[in-house]
């Protein structure tokens, strides 16, 4: 059976480039439409507490122009849940957030924040919003996620990507992800993956059975500077398709 994998394109860093000078260029809605037309299955954006790239106006504008689902990454706090409730994206992914970090560093600690997350989940007003957790490929985090009734996870692939770059123990990091995917499948949890994926390392992740979706952003936006966003997405889609 073919393991059809959706590709979510994170366009946060189009807004990062825009914000470096102010104004409206490059236009994030144009990036969203190019991604959609190139075959992206969904658009992902992360509205951070400090609004360092995407803001609420961007979120509304993107939702107004795209015809594919939007996945909203947010910190687990009341302010961000209020934004999700207001704009009603297709899905929300809770991610850890540290104001000083350059990018998301590691997965959400569900075990440590179990009661806080249980309380916050009650505040999501629409049953139509799919909820996922961005977690490390760790058994205990998966058990805690299951116990909260979450049916979708995105596995943090950053350690695997780092291992590939530094020529460290790639097999060890890959095995952690494979084991986590199998456990998630046993729990009837849909498994997504993302962070640090690129043309060189995505194939081994895409070839893992039962991974349903990959979210890729920084690499695609960087590659698009040289090759165009449509071409970058088409190439990534081709590599993923050939891996499964």
Image (spheres, rainbow, N blue to C red):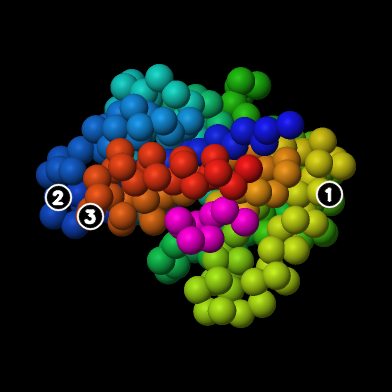
Residue annotated with mark 1: 183
Between marks 1 and 3 in the image, the one whose residue lies nearer the viewer: 3
Magenta region: which residues? 197-204
- Kindly state the secondary structure of the residue where label 2 is placed: loop
Query: How far from the left and from the top, in percent, is residue 119?
Result: 71, 41
Pick whichever, 90 or 192, lies toward us. 192
Query: Crowding at label 3, few (<14), some or many (≥20) Cα neighbours within 10 Å?
Result: few
Outermost residue toward the front in this view: 242
- Kindly state the secondary structure of the residue where label 3 is placed: helix
Pick whichever, 24 or 225, lies toward us. 225
Q: Residue at x 71, y 58 (%)?
A: 177
Q: Residue at x 38, y 39 (%)?
A: 234
Residue annotated with mark 3: 226
Q: In this orientation, does residue 118 appear?
A: no
Pick whichever, 203 or 18, lies toward us. 203
Q: In this orientation, does residue 173 appear?
A: yes
Q: Main secondary structure of the magenta part?
A: loop
Q: Confirm or deny contact between disc 2 and disc 1 (CB under 8 A).
A: no
Residue annotated with mark 2: 22
- Kindly state the secondary structure of the residue where label 1 is placed: helix
Q: Is residue 72 left or right of residue 188?
A: left
Q: Confirm or deny contact between disc 2 and disc 3 (CB under 8 A).
A: no
- Nearer-N-terminus badge (2/3): 2
């Amino acid at each position: 059976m073919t393991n059809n994998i959706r590709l979510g394109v994170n366009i946060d860093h189009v807004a990062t480039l825009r914000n470096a000078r102010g104004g409206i260029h490059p236009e994030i809605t144009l990036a969203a439409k190019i991604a959609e037309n190139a075959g992206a299955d969904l658009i992902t954006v992360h509205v951070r507490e400090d609004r360092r790239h995407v803001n609420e106006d961007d979120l509304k504008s993107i939702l107004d122009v795209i015809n594919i689902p939007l996945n909203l990454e947010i910190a687990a706090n009341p302010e961000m849940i209020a934004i999700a409730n207001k704009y009603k994206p297709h899905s929300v992914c809770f991610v850890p957030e540290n104001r000083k970090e350059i990018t998301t560093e590691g997965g959400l600690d569900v075990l440590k924040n179990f009661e806080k997350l249980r309380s916050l989940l009650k505040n999501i007003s629409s049953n139509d919003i799919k909820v996922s957790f961005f977690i490390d490929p760790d058994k205990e985090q998966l058990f805690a996620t299951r116990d909260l009734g979450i049916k979708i996870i995105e596995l943090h692939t950053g350690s695997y990507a780092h291992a590939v770059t530094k020529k460290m123990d790639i097999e060890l990091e890959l095995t952690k992800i494979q084991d986590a995917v199998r456990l998630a499948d046993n729990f009837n949890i849909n498994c997504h993956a993302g962070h640090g994926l690129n043309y060189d390392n995505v194939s081994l992740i895409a070839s893992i059975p039962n991974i349903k979706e990959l979210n890729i952003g920084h690499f695609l936006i960087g590659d698009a500077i040289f090759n165009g966003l449509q071409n970058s997405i088409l190439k990534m889609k081709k590599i993923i398709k050939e891996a499964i």
